[in-house]
Image: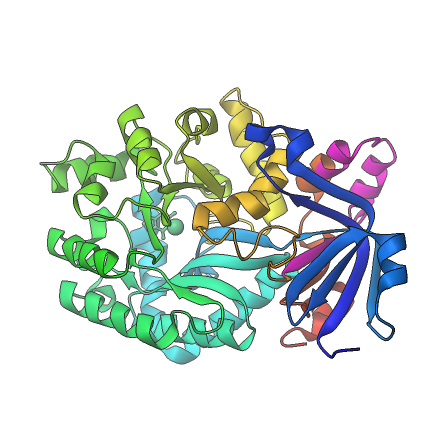
Amino acid sequence: SRPGTLAIRARLLSFDADPAVDGEAAAIRYVEDGILVIRDGIITEIGEGPSLARRLEPGVPLIDHRPHLVMPGFIDPHLHLPQTQVIASYGAELMEWLAKYTFPEELRYGDSGVAGEASRFLLDTLAANGTTTAAVYCTTHQVSAEAFFHEAGRRNLRMIAGKVMMDRNAPPGLLDTPQSGYDETKELISAWHGHGRLEVAITPRFAPTSTEAQLEAAGALASEFPDLPIQTHLSENHAEIAYVAEAFPWSKDYTDVYERYGLVRPRALYGHCVHLSGREREALAEQGASAIFCPTSNLFLGSGLYDLAASRALGLKTGIATDIGGGTSYSMLTTAAEGYKVLALKGQKLPAFEAFHMLTAGNAAAMGIETRVGRLAPGLEADVVVLDSHATAPLRRRMERVETLAEELFALMVLGDERATVATYAMGRKIHDRYHAGQRGLA
Ligand code: GUN
Ligand code: ZN
C-alpha cells in the first residue's frame, strides 16, 4: 500500500450542519462502528466499519480505537501565547488584571527563546486536550509571532496567529507604532502566511491600546489583504466600554470604532462580545464578523454573561474559546461545560450536540476555515481527537446510568478534561498519545 495511508476504526461523530439551526437529524453524522481512511493527511473516506474493513487495500495500517469516540480535532478560536504563566492570577477585573499581571509578563516575549519555549508548551498542551487548531495572540514583539509560527509549522498544524498591535496604554517595552505594527505584520504575512497550514491574523489588541492612527493602519492592512483573519477584543467589561466611549468620543458605540476602520468583516474574530447592544450585534452579523464566547474567562474576570440567544436571533456567528490566560482551562470540554453554566444563568440552554458542533464545525465556520477542518468528511484535513468517555472514575460511574449518545456527550463535556484525550492526530500524524504523555513533543 501507499505510504501515508492509514485507517482509523472507532465510533465516529461529526456535524454536517448546526443542530441548533438545522435540527439534530440533519446535523449529526454518527457511525457506531466506523472507519476513517486518511491518505497523505487528508480524509478520503468515512463509512461503516465492517464493509470498509473488507475493502481496505492490504497493508494499510488500521488503528483500532474502538470503543472510543473519534471527532474532528477541537478548535480554539481565541487564546494568548504569552499568558500560560498568567493563568490563575488572583483577584482582578480586566483592566487591573492586564496592568498588574499580563503586561509585565508579556514584556518577556521580546526574547525568542522565551517565546519558543512557551510555544512548545502551548502546542503540547493543546494537543493533549485534543485541540488541533487555534487563533493565537502573540505579543507586540515580532519575534514572539515568528517563534510561534516556527513551532506550529514544524508540527504541520493549522494555526492562525498574529503579532499584537498596541501603541498606547501599556508599558513602553510593549508598544509599537502605527508604522512598525503595519510593517512587521506585513513582513510576517510574506514570511508565514500560507506557509503549510499557517495564517497570519491582523491583531490590534483592542481599541483602548491603539490610537486612531494605529487602527487606521490596521484597516489599511485589512483592505490590502481582504481574505486575512482579524482578531481583537470587544465589549468584555463595563470599565473597558466606558474607556472606549471616552477615548473615541465620536463613536456611536464600541463596535462602531472597529467599523470605522474597516475591521468588521468575515473572518474578523471578536473576543468576548458580552455587553453588546442590539445595534452592535446587528452590525457584526450583517458584516459577517464572528463573536467569540469565552466562558471561563468571563466568569474568572467577572466580566459578564454572554447572550447566545441574542446572537442567534440576529444570525451572528458565535465561536467558543478558552481565552488562556484570562480563561482558566485549556480543555475545550471544560470550556463547553462552563459555557453551559453561563447560559444557564441567562436562562438559556446548550445541548451537548450543539456544544460539540461549536467546538468543531461551528468554530471552523466562525474562523472561515470550514472547507479545511472541523468535520470528518472526504477532502478535509485529517485533524482528529480520540475521546474516552470512561476516562475517570466519576465518568465511569456516571456512564453506568447513561442511555443515549446525547447523555454520554453531555456527561463527557461536564466531567471530562484532558484525561479524556486518548490520542490526537494532525494531518493523520499522531501528535499526542495518552500513554506516552510523559515523553511529549514530536512523535
Ligand atoms: N482585552 C485586551 N487584552 C486582553 C487580554 O489579554 N485578555 C482578555 N481577557 N481581554 C483582553
Ligand atoms: Zn483575549
Residue 377 visible, this angle: yes
Pick the residue in front: 21 or 2. Answer: 2
The C terminus lies in quadrant: bottom right
Q: Nearer the viewer, residue 255 or 328?
A: 255
Q: Residue at x 43, y 37 (%)?
A: 317
Question: Which stretch did the figure color magenta?
Answer: 383-409
Q: Quadrant of residue 195?
A: bottom left
Q: Is residue 36 left or right of residue 222?
A: right
**What sort of colour scheme is used for the picture?**
rainbow
Residue 4's image quarter?
bottom right
The percent coordinates of residue 305 (x first, y second) are 44, 30
Q: Position of residue 10 (x, y in %)?
A: 81, 53
Q: Which residue: 43% across, 72% down?
A: 149
Residue 361 lies in magenta, yes or no?
no
Relative image position of residue 327 (x, y in whole percent) = 48, 47
Indicate the quadrant containing the N terminus: top left, top right, bottom left or bottom right: bottom right
